Amino acid sequence: NQHQNQQQHQHQQQLKLGELSCAKYGGPSDEIASKMVYWKDIPSDASFQSPHKLQHSQPVQNVHETKYMTFEPDGGGWNNIRMAMETVVVLAHATGRTLVLPPAQSIYLLRRDAHKHNTKFTFADFFPIESLNDEHHGIDIITMEEFLQRMAMTGRLRNHTTGHISFPPQ
């Protein structure tokens, strides 16, 4: 079983965005599955960088300021959550911002039978976040923990109303 899990993990690592493999889960062959994919990988998309990102990378008073986009996923069903995630990835990419993924949380309809399985999930559990970062040079995606380390714990997160430094709750 461990060997099978290692093979599945290696196979997932080999898949590029825009590919689908169902055979190992008892579904159709990879050849048939390739006809079911509703998206296509466009190689030139991987090198696109937003002109806004280029503006953010220019030093202002000798400081490179990364702009961030945080979001809270829809509280509805999985399809709403998936569509919101796809939309926010595109929006962050188009505006040149680093996307900050929300922390692990329960997802409607996946929190049933909490005594039987994990009920807290991150987007990395469902989306190829590492592949997005690796294959698309203009997309930067980080976890909420990484964002808090970069910004809040270094005193760079400020309350916009008061101007005071904000730290995460203890």
Image: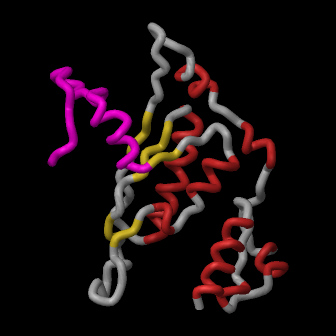
| Residue 106 magenta | no
Judging depth in this view, the residue of 6 and 53 nearest the camera is 6
Is residue 149 rendered magenta in the image?
yes
x then y, percent, for residue 118: 35, 79
Residue that appears at 36% across and 84% down: 117
- Tell me the quarter of the picture where residue 18 sits: bottom right
Residue stretch rendered in magenta on the structure: 143-170
Residue ranking furthest to the top: 61
User: Where is residue 146, by image quadrant?
Assistant: top left
Name the side, left or right, on which 80 lies relative to 55.
Answer: left
Q: Position of residue 82 (x, y in %)?
A: 50, 63
Q: Residue at x 67, y 70 (%)?
A: 12
Colour logic: secondary structure
Question: Residue at 58% across / 39% down in the picture?
Answer: 93
Q: Give the percent coordinates (x, y) of residue 114.
A: 29, 84
Provide the major secondary structure of the magenta segment: loop
